[in-house]
Image (cartoon, rainbow, N blue to C red):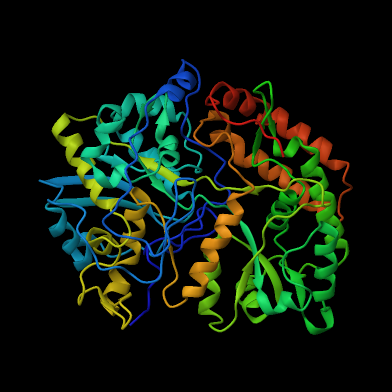
Amino acid sequence: MTSTTSGQAGFSRRGFLGLTGLAVATAGLAACNPGGGSGGGGASASSAVKLPTYREFTGITADIPGNEKGLQAAFFKLPEAVQSVKTPPLTGKVTGLTETFETMSPGMKDNPFWQRLNAKLGGELELQIAEDIGDGYPAKFATVLASNNLPDMMWVPPNQGIPNIGPMLEAKFQDLTPYLSGDAVLEYPNLAALKPDSWKTAVINGKIWGAPIPSTPFGQVMAGRRDVWDAVGGLNADSADEFLEKAKELTRPGEQKYALEANYTNILHMVTEWFGAPNGWAVNKDRTLTHLFETDQYAAGIEFTAKMFAAGVFYPDSKASDIRTRVANGSIAAQVLVGPHDIRSYRVLNQSAKFDILLPFSADGKIKPVYDMGYGTVGFTPFKKAEEGKIRELLALINYLSAPFGTAEYLQKNYGEAGQDYTLTSDGNPVLTESGTSNVPGLASALNIMASPENVIFNPGYDDDTRYVHGQEQKLLENAWRNPTNGSYSDTSAKVGAKISKQLRDKVIDIITGREQVGALKDAVKRWQSEGGNKMREEYQAALPAGVPVFNS
């Protein structure tokens, strides 16, 4: 049988979401942020909407508590399951459109895990599931939307380029504000347990369109094997130059050892934090916005990363697919992970070593460093327009599917039935059976992309890792900044944001690797501005919520 004890089964993917296990991360989710309005008073209306009342789920007590600022609760083992839903949510058939980031599970008629889930739900949940290949979900979404034969629910992702989200929602989907705003959400306790920052991403034009799907609020981190870095005084440093000296000392090409992976974009992200660059956009005193690409801090980060490249501290193969293995065995000293929780992924490769997370430090001992928080959700799931009874049935279903970690509903959704789909280890953690391994992951991924609880830290068998990650998250929060456009929507960003950002970053990589001079950055930024950057700025400024702090790194 195959071991699966990562917690939130079904999340696994490339850098899009970094969804693996309980604590999932969202590096790079700024391409489209469906949450504000664009025109028509949407910005002011969205700022004024009353978010759902937050009421923490208290049925299970974490071994180490989290908080509303984003610190994640931590568990050393799976708690004894408790019921969070009193009655089955469905009375009939419900249809939905979602995506899976795992190998597709067998269909409902051939999948006993799916059938057992439907029995618990009290009806029939029938899903169209797009796979993460080719044009994938956006193409499927567009086809279904154009058919005028909509399923009851359709997941809206945050970064896959679906345009005109505001008009689409107004035309096709149900305004859920009366059911979810303020204390109304308390009828659905598992939805009330979703944090206010998560809900902001589901607000467009002053209306709440669905329950958000939380992911870890933390962003990328640099990590490395502790004993490797201990040889040079540890992973952290007091300046960029000190870090480079450590990296040079660890780099021994004759022994096939290098300090850093060759993912220059990710390494640059870490370096720009040392130089105090903003997270995506910076809010100025006059409430205008300046993009990361336009800042002196970003240019300084590029220059320093180019200096590291010239020093030869990067692994020479930028297309290598075994970087995690090389970090685990010590032949590469550090890489950038999707979030703090992700250090547990090394445990499969090296059960005895310890791994450290770098805390952003000042590039020169004077500059105030920043830590970039992630987007915090992976979208939301709106309902097509329907009569009130149907809407309440769908809300009850999403309430079930959003059941917190450790509940009976969470186990049913992610692992299935004990003895059938999974068994428990001696320390009480779930392991999928052979049948479960075939039937669960693809469907569990699709379900978690439609609805999910707040995430937790869970590293079964590695209590020290759990304590360490929780402690590092506390420290990261001390210098944390969130992208001020999270929860706002730019149609231009949805249409061209990914394309024009890639154009600029390709030029940046040319500069880092010495194929272009640093002066090429200025022209690349001008092109980014003219091909959509300035228009995105206008749209985000129009939708900028009140109270977003001025960036003052």
Which quadrant, please, contains the C terminus? Answer: top right
Identify the residue shown where x is 73% and y is 39%: 293
Identify the residue shown where x is 54% and y is 64%: 469
In the drawing, does residue 364 fall left or right of residue 409?
right
Q: Position of residue 518 (x, y in %)?
A: 87, 46
In the image as oriented, which residue stretches furthest toward the top? Answer: 40
Total marks drawn? 0
Which quadrant, please, contains the N terminus? Answer: bottom left
Instruction: Work out whether residue 244 or residue 162 is closer to the camera in this orientation and state it.
Output: 244
Q: Position of residue 204 (x, y in %)?
A: 42, 28
Judge whether residue 338 can be spotted in this image. Answer: no
Q: Position of residue 13 (x, y in %)?
A: 48, 60
Q: Relative to 502, does residue 284 appear above or below in the rendering?
A: above
Identify the residue shown where x is 82% and y is 41%: 521
Q: Relative to 34, does residue 299 appear above or below in the rendering?
A: below
Quadrant housing residue 182: top left
Q: Position of residue 44 (x, y in %)?
A: 47, 19
Instruction: Work out whether residue 239 or residue 382 is closer to the camera in this orientation and state it.
Output: 239
In the drawing, does residue 473 fall left or right of residue 379?
right
Instruction: Work out whether residue 503 or residue 44 is closer to the camera in this orientation and state it.
Output: 44
Quadrant housing residue 332: bottom right
Identify the residue shown where x is 55% and y is 57%: 473
Judge whether residue 241 can be spotted in this image. Answer: yes
In the drawing, does residue 519 fall left or right of residue 131?
right
